[in-house]
Image (cartoon, rainbow, N blue to C red):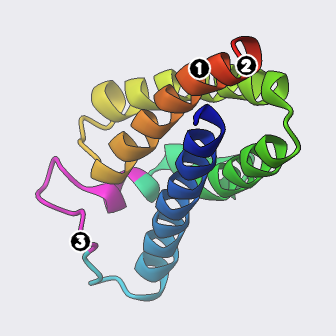
Amino acid sequence: MVFEIILILAFIGYLLSAYAFYIEKRKEKEERYKAVCDIGEHASCTKAFTSAYGKMFGISNSIYGMLFYVLVFILALLNFGNYIFYLSVLSFLETLYLAYILYFKLKNFCLICHGIYLINILLLVFSWKFAFWI
C-alpha cells in the first residue's frame, strides 16, 4: 500500500511541476496570460514561478521538480526505499526554503506551490515508512 502511495504522489508531483513549467513558458510568450491559479495580487502562481527565486543555476525549479518526481517514481519501482527517503529529506529542506521565500520575501500565496509542498511532506512520511517499516 505504501509503495502505491509513493507512486501516486510522485505522479501528482510531476503533474504539478509540469503545470508550473507550462505557466512559466506561457507567461514568457504571452504577457497577458493569466493562469488558473492566479487568484489575486497576493495569490499568484505566476508571480512565484517567474520571480528571481523561480530558478536555480539558471534552470527552472519546475524542471528540477519534474526530474525529482521521475527519479522517485523509478526508485520506487526498483524498490530503493532508502534512496527515496534521503531524497525526500532533501526535498523537504528545499520545501522549507521555498516556503520561506514565498511567504516572507515574495509575500505571496501560490496554490500549485502549496500542492507541491504537501506532496513533498507526504513523500517524506511515506518514504520513511517504505524505507524502514516494510
- SS under mark 3: loop
Q: Which mark is residue 134?
A: 2
Q: Is residue 85 left or right of residue 124?
A: right
Residue situated in front as seen by the camera: 27 or 88: 88
Mark sitting earlier along the chain (2/1):
1
State the CA–CA distance, disc 2 to disc 3. Answer: 40 Å
Q: Which mark is residue 36?
A: 3
Q: Name above or below for residue 27 compared with residue 105.
A: below
Q: Is residue 95 left or right of residue 64?
A: left
Residue drawn 58% across the image and 36% down it? 1
Label 1 amino acid? Leu
- SS under mark 1: helix
Count how many numbered circles sit on residues in the image. 3
Residue drawn 88% across the image and 44% down it? 78
Label 2 amino acid? Ile
Residue 123, image x, y percentages: 57, 31
